[in-house]
Amino acid sequence: MNKLYRHSILVLLLVSLLAVYGCSSGNGNNNAASGADASAPGTAEPAPENLASELRFPLAQQVPTLDPHLSLNTNVYVTLNIFEGLFAFDANFNPVPMLAESYDLSEDGKTYTFHLRQGVKFHNGKEMKAEDVAASLNRWKSLTGRAQASLGESEFTIKDDYTVGLALSEPRNDIISQLSHVLNNAAILPKEVVDAAGPDGVKEYIGTGPFKLVEWKQDQYVHVAKFDDYQSVDTPASGLSGKKEAYLQDIYFDIVTDSATRFSSFLAGTYDYVDVTLDNLPQVEGLEGVKVNKNLGSDINLVFNKKSPLFSNIKYREAVAAVLDADEILLGTVNSPDLYRLNPSYMYPENTTWYSEAGKENYNQKNPDKAKQLLQEAGYSGQEVSLLTTKELGGSFYNATIVLQKELEAIGVKTKLDINDFATLLKKRADPNAWDIYVGLFTMPSTPSQLLYLNPTYGFAEDAKLAELTKQLTAASTTEEIKAANDALQQYEWEYLAAVKIGDTYSQSATRDKLSGLTTLAGYPNLANTKLSQ
């Protein structure tokens, strides 16, 4: 009879020691990653009678959907406060049970049994049970590429009212991390809501979180309110996990796409939290009652379309990797040497389990002569390279891409910029006939198996050896096995070049001292324990 391993040895079985996002503590900001409190150090806790009941929080983008299984980027700012999953990441990106009470894993690493918390209520008053969990997670899996890659044909099944099973065809050490990820979040919704979902998403936005949806006014705001029947866990609050208590009665997520308007509204007192550009930094530095936060946020990667006529040829990918000047691209993106760092690994150095320097000899080569030689060997004859980008998201994608364009044209590569709104960019990126190179900022994954560009559906990395090395990585269990498998995968990635790592970026925000308890993770806010003094 196989032994069952309880959640208490999660780290040993799932090897989910994950990235600590950020070199500095005590900060939270847009596009940053921190589990720290955004309140000023030493600020006294406001008395309950001195607390404001309403907070307005500015969003830099439109909200295309509130369906948590489809949510990316700005809409996650909202959905993570409405919906919850079986697990959530703490401040160090370790998965912690939320709607799950515990789980068992069979000795062969293939069978998961999830034990659900009892008495948890949805916003419509219904108690959450196994039928809701199974329906939600099977839909999530069908819509999420990284989940499909991990779960294969496996389905979540109902064992009893408070128990859900998952039987895999092979052992995987990343399942709990997949269930905790902030993007395309594995949120639990009522079964009837899942069953009624159409191709554009669910029709009702009902979760179990500390806030419930009141009104979504397109292009203006999303209004959520305190859910009085919220059932919190009693573990310490950390990141997106642990105890949650809604001190705010109402939150308005205002859609303010113009950065100058967001910042001027912050200065005018409309907002108590705002992203800060370098141009705006002098206006908030030293401002009484305001602190500036800097946090490690996204990493920048150049992704090749491996089905394009040119970049299906490894020589062309090698040529691009050879010419890249990471410092130049990073500086062109964030405009300050203080807001980036070089990093040859697909994980942050803080993530000691998964950080690797294998293949670093191919990083940041700055070698145009080598690049020209590789182009000659490949037979380049002036074909145009399409660079897919957008000016949205603060211009970061576009700024990185125009620096890349300059570096490519310096070695004789003819290029064109294909500039789109972000929604169109996403559609084109999924089309193998629509682009050649895409440069973007990525929310750092918690495990290498979550790297989008290693997935055949993202940049079309259909390579047998890459798939086999990824499989060996997710099946590893001991520290030694993990290191060997991780080094092998990263070494091969630097040879195969599904993507090229450029580096890691920081961003800045400003918060008022009267705002306390706000935490962010990978830039996404947990407003559950946030207090605002009047």
Image (cartoon, helix red, strand yellow):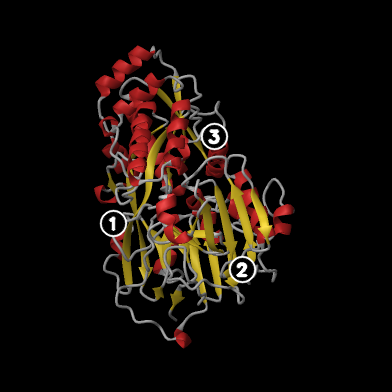
| Residue 434 position by quadrant | top right
- The amino acid beneath tag 1 is Cys
- The amino acid beneath tag 3 is Thr
Q: Which mark is residue 23?
A: 1
Name the residue tied to disc 3.
457
Q: Is residue 271 above or below residue 411?
A: below
Mark 2 packing: few (<14 Cα in 10 Å), some, or many (20+)?
Answer: many
| Residue 310 position by quadrant | top left
Mark 1 packing: few (<14 Cα in 10 Å), some, or many (20+)?
Answer: few
Q: Secondary structure at mark 2?
A: strand
Q: Position of residue 162 (x, y in %)?
A: 64, 63
Name the residue tied to disc 2.
212
Q: Secondary structure at mark 1?
A: loop
Q: Secondary structure at mark 3?
A: loop
Q: Earlier in the sequence, mark 2 or mark 1?
A: 1
- The amino acid beneath tag 2 is Lys
Q: Position of residue 11 (x, y in %)?
A: 40, 55
Q: Earlier in the sequence, mark 3 or mark 1?
A: 1
Residue contact at pointers 2 and 3, CB within 8 angstroms: no
Measure the C-alpha gap from mark 2 to mark 1: 34 Å
